[in-house]
Amino acid sequence: MRISRIIFIGLFVCASFARICAQNNDIYIGDANVNEFPNYTGKLNAFNPDGIDTNQLSFYEGDSLIHLNIQKPRKADLISENKTVLFLVLNHQNYPSRTTWYKNVLKMSVENGMMKKGDEFAINTFDCNRPEYQSPKKDILFPKKRGFVNSKSAFIKQINDIRFNKTRLTGDCQRKGDIYGAIYSAIKKLDAYATDNVKSIVVLADDFSLVTNIKERAIISLSRKSGIPIYGITYHQIIQRKYGIEKICDESFGQMALDRSNRVTYMSNKLNGFMNNAIQRASGWVYDFDFDSPFNKNGEKHTVRVKYKTQFPVAVFQYSSPKMGLFDWIASNVVLSIVLFLLILLISVFTFLFLRKRKRKQIEEEDAQREEMEILKSQQQAAAMKTQKQEKELKEMRSKEAAKAQKENRAKAQKEKEAEEKQQLQLMSARGNLPWFTLEHDGASVSVEMNKPVFTFGRSEEEANYTINLKTVSRRHFSVSFDGNGYLIKDLNSSNGIKVNGIAVKESKIQHGDVISIGDLYITFHI
């Protein structure tokens, strides 16, 4: 008995504290921004789908009440594109017809487009009272592990998998269906599930629960803290005692539907309406507001406490006051500003006179120094011009001597080259004549005498000793040279190369009768 009282008192205290914490989740305000000082603007986000009563909203800075201008609410931007919904279905073993009714409502809702692309759905059933609430391991939901699915076919399979002969627990199931316990377990389960979607719980059950170990306030507080609204699709029956979930749905920001005729189509449409609007309801409303700061510019941050329907703050935000500028300070200290202005003016006049006198003296000294520098510069320029003239004459003299020596060297080299060529030609004509070439192309033939120790063939008149006007011949194609002992043919990096007696070569000795070929040009070497 004593333990029961302690548990009851503990739940009552926790529920009272949770009521205040839950109110804190209803309103959020970011820091305000300055519009035109002292006016500030901000946005208040209200997560209650029905909005808030702005007449009961007040802002305090310290103990001072701030006068607000609040605009009409507007729908907040959607916090998610999709939803994750856990459906709780009462599967009481003594009332299978009700379970069938819940299944039919779900199937019709799915067929009418309740599940959108990206949504996640799962079904848990519950039946009896949890035997011991002090044991967290004893879960009322069935199956114990149920995964969320994101396709219509997979969700319908979960609906069809609800069996009347499968129960989670076997206890006092004759009259009691633990709706509160099931919702409490479902909130815990869904809160632990990681997703960016908007989360909701839909309870499909009758409109009473005789099990009241968990109070409404504890469920509402847990729902608000987790941000999971509860929606109810209730099977109506005539009873004397009512333990419905209407209050839980309302205060958790969900909705509830009850049809005294228990029409499947009507309740299916209600459920679809709930789910189609669930994301917008979870996103809440935005209230634009503005206020005038009671403080002058001081460069500090100010904290504003927001109260709503209670003496306790439900939200806190800050705004920054700009620093006081020069003109702001002058406007608030007129007499002192005039005195300082006159003092600064007097100091400026004396400073100006002193600097002007000092500047005049400095200019005179600079002028005298400039004249001395100009005289010295003129003397240096005259000396430099004289030096340059002497260097130029010496350079011209050396250039003439170098040109003369270069000319003599070239003449000497030319004579030596001519003498060497003459000597080479004498050796080449030791047999009584100089070597010669016979060129044959396209049926025509011509003979060319090798009248130089190094004889070059090519297409260029400037670079070859003998010009061959064929496309297959390069500008400087090949050369034949005499080294005193024999003759050497060399390819001069031509495009098409050369062949000697049909063999491609870059450099090779040639003898009398060898045939040099370039494409269809044939050149026979004679000694």
Image (cartoon, rainbow, N blue to C red):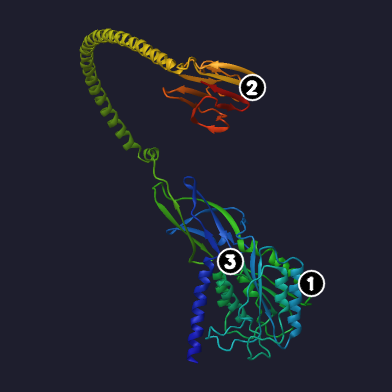
Badge 2 marks a residue whose secondary structure is strand
List the residue tagged with mark 2: 441
Between 140 and 228, the residue placed more toward the observer is: 140
Q: CA distance from mark 3 to mark 1?
A: 31 Å
Picture coordinates of residue 439 (x, y %)?
59, 20
The three-letter amino acid code for the residue at tag 3 is Thr
The earlier-in-sequence mark between 2 and 1 is 1
Answer above or below: position of 170 versus 152.
below
Answer above or below: position of 38 versus 393.
below
The number of discs equals 3
Task: Give residue 73's quadrant in the image.
Answer: bottom right
Between 458 and 82, the residue placed more toward the observer is: 458
Picture coordinates of residue 62 (x, y %)?
42, 58
Mark 2 or mark 1, whichever is nearer to me: 2
Horizontal side of 376 relative to 162 (left or right) equals left
List the residue tagged with mark 1: 265
Residue furthest out toward the front: 431
Q: Residue at x 51, y 81 (%)?
A: 11
List the residue tagged with mark 3: 195
Residue 49 in sight = no
Mark 2 neighbour class, 10 Å CA radius: few under 14, some 14 to 19, many 20 or more:
few
Mark 3 or mark 1, whichever is nearer to me: 3
Mark 3 neighbour class, 10 Å CA radius: few under 14, some 14 to 19, many 20 or more:
few
Mark 2 or mark 3, whichever is nearer to me: 2
Q: CA distance from mark 2 to mark 3?
A: 90 Å
The three-letter amino acid code for the residue at tag 2 is His
